[in-house]
């Protein structure tokens, strides 16, 4: 059979036309927008494409309606009893992409691009690592990171043993309730100047002090997971928004303090 090729700005791509192995997913090889523009293509074989950020392996590609790449899945195998996540990790290739003034290199699960071709986020296999320098020190992620249009770090989920040296004290950011599927809108966030916008921690006591010296402490707690019945850590979440500080220790527990008149300190538990 002569394979059918789809012409795109990234080369002539071959959509899936036959099942190749047990890891093949069941989905349409081609999807289109109502306008007829290509929405996604599930490739017959892993294919190297060239993006604005660099060379990238691809098995599934989604597109914006204008024709530029939206998301690339370097591997897209079906996890089952016959093909595990470990197998999928071994299938993956290491890719290197330019992000801002630097580069990141890892086995990637998904790369999200904006319409201009710049990287918006990278999700990696949790056996892999990416490192980033911040004004508070180096941090490591085993999930991925989100970036702005200039390649600056916007948000990230850190590994458990991360330490950041902040104006509030040493921060040990970690969110055990993070979304494991993607690296967008992660719990550790930064503004354009690299300052902390938000963080989650299960390792620190967060104390807030008012102008009169009165203090209130917020600590991580353990509760029962409603789905599994197992105990889970609930982190303290802190967010700096405009003129206020928001602190919560679970659903419906948010408290708001004036940023200019209150001081935060951190103490490792």
Image (cartoon, helix red, strand yellow):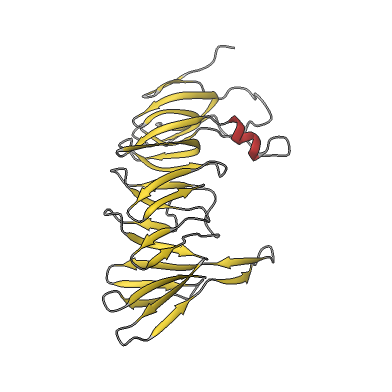
Image coords of residue 228 (percent x, y): 69, 63
Q: Quadrant of the N terminus?
A: top right
Residue toward you, 223 or 170: 170
Of all residues shown, which one is farthest toward the top?
2
The quarter holding residue 67 reads top left
In this rendering, the answer to whether 187 lies above or below 14 is: below
Residue toward you, 266 or 180: 266
Q: Which residue is depicted at the point 63% across and 31% down?
A: 24
In this rendering, the answer to whether 256 lies above or below 40 is: below
Image coords of residue 240 (percent x, y): 34, 67
Left/right of residue 258 with respect to residue 21 in the rendered view = left
The number of numbered discs placed on residues in the rendered structure image is: 0
The quarter holding residue 103 reads top left
Residue toward you, 96 or 251: 96
Residue toward you, 135 or 221: 135
Q: Which residue is depicted at the point 29% across and 44% down?
A: 149
Image coords of residue 101 (percent x, y): 29, 38
User: In the rendered image, is residue 31 in sight?
Assistant: no
Image coords of residue 47 (percent x, y): 50, 23
């Amino acid at each position: 059979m002569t394979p059918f090729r789809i012409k795109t700005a990234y080369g002539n791509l071959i959509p899936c036309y036959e099942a190749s192995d047990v890891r093949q997913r069941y989905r349409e090889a081609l999807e289109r927008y109502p306008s007829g523009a290509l929405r996604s293509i599930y490739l017959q074989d892993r294919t190297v494409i060239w993006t604005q950020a660099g060379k990238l392996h691809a098995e599934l590609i989604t597109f914006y309606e204008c024709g530029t790449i939206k998301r690339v899945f370097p591997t897209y195998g079906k996890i089952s009893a016959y093909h595990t996540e470990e197998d999928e990790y071994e299938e993956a290739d290491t890719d290197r992409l330019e992000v801002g003034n630097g580069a990141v290199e890892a086995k990637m699960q998904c790369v999200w691009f904006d319409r201009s071709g710049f990287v918006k986020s990278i999700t990696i296999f949790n056996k892999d690592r990416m490192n980033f320098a911040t004004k508070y020190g180096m941090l490591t992620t085993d999930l991925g990171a989100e970036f702005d249009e200039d390649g600056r770090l916007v948000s990230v989920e850190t590994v458990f043993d991360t330490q950041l040296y902040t104006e509030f004290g040493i921060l040990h950011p970690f969110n055990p309730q993070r979304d494991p599927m993607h690296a967008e809108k992660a719990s550790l966030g930064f503004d354009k100047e690299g300052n902390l916008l938000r963080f989650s921690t299960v390792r620190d006591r967060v104390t807030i002090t008012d102008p009169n010296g009165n203090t209130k402490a917020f600590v991580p707690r353990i509760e029962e997971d409603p789905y599994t019945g197992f105990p889970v850590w609930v982190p303290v979440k802190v967010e700096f928004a405009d003129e206020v500080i928001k602190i919560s220790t679970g659903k419906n527990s948010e408290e708001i303090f004036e940023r200019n008149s209150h001081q935060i300190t951190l103490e490792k538990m």
